[in-house]
Amino acid sequence: MVKKSLNKSKAFTLIELTVVLLIIGLMTVTTAPLTIKGIARFNLVSSSNLLAADIRELQQLAICDCSSQYLICFFTDHYQMTKSAYPSPKRLGTRSLPAGIRVEHTNFPGDVLRFSAKGTPSPQGGTVTLYDPVTGKRKYVIIASITGRVRVSDQKP
């Protein structure tokens, strides 16, 4: 009589696969909102820091050229850096904000930040408010009127 040896199968059963897929699905569903808010928070922080860096760069250009022709125009989803030279303005760059981040408010006349030849905002300092609707948070980029100091804050000035 010949005995058949039964080899144990090294495969997974259907129940085991179902349980593993269910656990992975639950983990994905619970961590997705946290990931989305984390990305939105990162976009807001990086956008405000980048705006502050761009403002500082234009201040330095105004000081180096001893020119009061440098300005930044703010729009809802981007801002544009320009040198208003004669005969036509020279666009230095346009920076688009990440999806969802928007310029909520500026207190500069006509939403245009101008620099004097000394690098200070002309005629006055002010604030640019960036808003993220996903997290509901705001970042304030504040430019001091006398010194031209640029800082980023969570608190309204």
Image (cartoon, grey):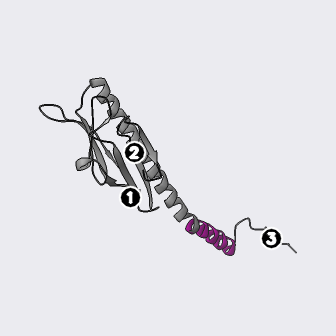
The residue sitting at 35% across, 49% down in the picture is 128
Q: Amino acid at mark 2?
A: Ile
Magenta extent: 13-29
Mark 3 vs mark 1: in front: 1
State which quarter of the image contains the N terminus: bottom right
Residue situated in front as seen by the camera: 77 or 24: 77
- Above or below 28: residue 50: above
Residue shown at 14% from the left, 34% from the top: 88
- Asked where in the image residue 18 lies, by quadrant, the reply is bottom right
Residue 68: within the magenta?
no
Nearest the eye: 16 or 100: 100
Report whether 15 appears left or right of 100.
right
Residue at disc 1, secondary structure: loop
Is tag 2's residue or tag 1's residue first in the polypeptide sequence? 1
Instruction: Give the vertical position of 103 relative to 69 (above or below).
Output: below
**Main secondary-structure element of the magenta-colored stretch:** helix
Query: What's under tag 3, amino acid-wise?
Result: Leu
Question: Which residue position is annotated with label 2?
Answer: 142
Which amino acid lies under the numbered mark 1 shown in the image of this protein?
Gly
Q: Quadrant of residue 151?
A: top left
Query: Crowding near pointer 3: few (<14 within 10 Å), some, many (20+)?
Result: few
Residue 100 is labelled as 1
Nearest-to-viewer mark from 2 and 1: 2
Question: What residue do we see at 69% from left, 68% from top?
Answer: 12
Which residue lies most toward the front here? 146
Distance, label 3 to label 1, CA atoms, is 61 Å
Image side of residue 136 versus residue 93, left or right: right
Q: Is residue 22 magenta?
A: yes
